[in-house]
Image (spheres, rainbow, N blue to C red):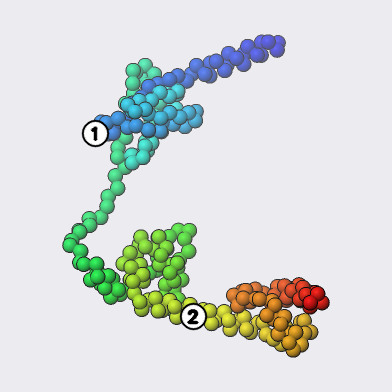
Amino acid sequence: MRHLLILLFLSLSTLALSQRAFFYGFVQDSTTKEELVGTHIRNISSDKLAISDAYGKFRLTAQVGDSIVLSNVGYQMLLWIAKENWFTSERVTFSLPVDTIYLEEIVVGKLPEYSKYKQMIIDTQPEDTSFWYFGVPQPEMKGSVLEKKQYTNPLFIASHPITFWHHAFSKKEKQKRKMVEIQRQSGIRDKADQKFTREWVRDVTKLQGDRLTDFIAYCKFTPKYLAETPLYVIQERMLVLLNDFMLEEVDG
């Protein structure tokens, strides 16, 4: 009985394999009729793959009804259903049309001298810089000023080239960005000073006078750290440093 089952299984396997056979194909440009090298031919029914050679030829296993997909860079991806005559023909020809992309007409005229061209860009009123790409955060304006990392974003340059050059060349825009940075840093320092006061450090550490002054300098907290860090985290970090500070006093 066991041998009978094994023979039956082998017979079914052989039958299943015999249903698929090789067919030979040729891939060409639908317009020029030239061979297409490196075309991917995939039998998605059996997950088999072939690639056309230097003459546009290939060989692939399939059976009647299989779905065959052909794809090549710059050409439309097309699907064929395997037919019975594929396996009796000497070669099956597949034609791929070019994947056409229509571009808008561009008129190129005589460009002005570099210095004049640069001044024209500086004098240009920047266009509306609001843009959005799926999955890319929209840049936030600080008044009418774009930060350097925003206007140098490749996506921004691609969609607003004139505005990019204006922000890159214009001294007025550079001065605006510098002023915004000064205001931002001033705001950070103000926020840090409001949180990390001498009185608060004294109440937490119980230090007085010169020891309090020395400890505040010992902490070396930056304004940015103090402005962005929660007060309880600053306090925990400060108490750890206080222990080190007192140990160094004893060792000294």
Foreground of the two, 244 or 44:
244
In this view of the protein, which residue sits in the foreground, 164 or 40?
164
Residue 213 percent across, percent down from the top left: 70, 85
Q: Which residue is mark 1?
A: 32
Q: Identify the image quadrant of residue 242.
A: bottom right
- Taking the view exactly as shown, the residue that stands out farthest to the bottom is 209
**Tag 2: amino acid:** Ile
Query: Which type of secondary structure does the marked residue at label 1 adopt?
Result: loop
Left or right relative to 155: residue 32: left
Residue 97 visible (yes or no): yes
Residue drawn 41% across and 30% down?
A: 51
Give the residue furthest to the front.
252
The answer to whether 70 appears left or right of 46 in the picture is left
Sequence-first tag of 2 and 1: 1
**Measured Cα–Cα span from mark 2 to mark 1:** 63 Å
The residue mark sitting in front, 2 or 1, is 2
Residue occupying image coordinates x 70% and y 12%:
2
Residue 110 in the image, given as x and y percentages of width and height:
17, 62
Residue 200: which numbered mark, if any? none
Query: In the image, what residue type sits under mark 1?
Result: Thr
Residue at 34 percent across and 32 percent down: it is 37
Q: Which mark is residue 182?
A: 2
